[in-house]
Amino acid sequence: MHFAYPYAALVTGIAILLYLWTGMVVGKARKTHGVDYPNTTGSDDFNRVWRAHQNTLEQLVVFLPSLWLFAVIVNDCWAAILGLVWALGRILYVRGYAIAAPKRATGFMIAILATAVLLFGALGVIVWHLFN
């Protein structure tokens, strides 16, 4: 079976799995810090893990459309490479944030820069084609 954009599709699956992993991290933190459902606040240690999970969801809303715009308009393989960079950044973000809030910065910058390249790369090509 052949389908278009296999690399972006694979990275989309990886991004979803990464988000599910962040949910499991929150579940473990709930047990560790005694935060029962439906509560979403607890100790600072729990709150940082929960925020990392929520922030990952917030970033998926920007990342996934940017990934697919880039894959369709620019290049599937490069979209996937940038998507993997995003995933690495998000892993660093979640792990760093669990330790201390300032330790999230490196992972956040890696992920946001990957998203920016995807989004502005695709939009740049669109604008280029519209006006040339």
Image: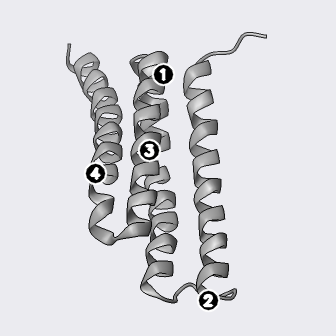
Q: Estimate how packed mark 2 is, as few (under 14), some (14 to 19) or many (20 or more) residues with alpha carbons within 10 Å.
A: few
**Where does label 4 land, which residue?**
106
Could you tell me residue 54's position as x and y percent? 50, 67
In front of the other: 120 or 127: 120
Q: Mark 4 or mark 1: name the one nearer the start of the chain.
A: 1
Q: Report the coloring of the rendering.
A: one colour
Left or right for 39, reference 58? right
Q: Which mark is residue 39?
A: 2
Could you tell me residue 61's position as x and y percent? 48, 52
Left or right for 18, reference 100? right
Q: Evaluate if marks 2 and 1 touch, with contact meaning CB atoms under 8 Å apart.
A: no
User: Secondary structure under badge 2?
Assistant: loop
Q: How far apart, in angstroms, are the residues tagged by discs 1 and 3?
A: 14 Å
Where, by quadrant of the figure, is residue 37 drawn? bottom right
Q: Mark 1 or mark 3: name the one nearer the start of the chain.
A: 3
* Depicted 26 relative to depicted 127: above or below: below
Amino acid on which the number 1 mark rests in the picture: Val
Q: Evaluate if marks 4 and 2 touch, with contact meaning CB atoms under 8 Å apart.
A: no
Q: Estimate how packed mark 1 is, as few (under 14), some (14 to 19) or many (20 or more) residues with alpha carbons within 10 Å.
A: some
> Furthest-top residue in view?
2
User: Secondary structure under badge 1?
Assistant: helix
Q: Which mark is residue 72?
A: 1
Residue that appears at 30% across and 62% down: 103
Amino acid on which the number 4 mark rests in the picture: Thr
User: Secondary structure under badge 4?
Assistant: helix
**Where does label 3 land, which residue?**
63
Q: How far apart, in angstroms, are the residues tagged by discs 2 and 1?
A: 41 Å
Q: Mark 4 or mark 2: name the one nearer the start of the chain.
A: 2
Could you tell me residue 69's position as x and y percent? 44, 30
Amino acid on which the number 3 mark rests in the picture: Phe
Q: Nearer the viewer, mark 1 or mark 3?
A: 3
Amino acid on which the number 2 mark rests in the picture: Asn
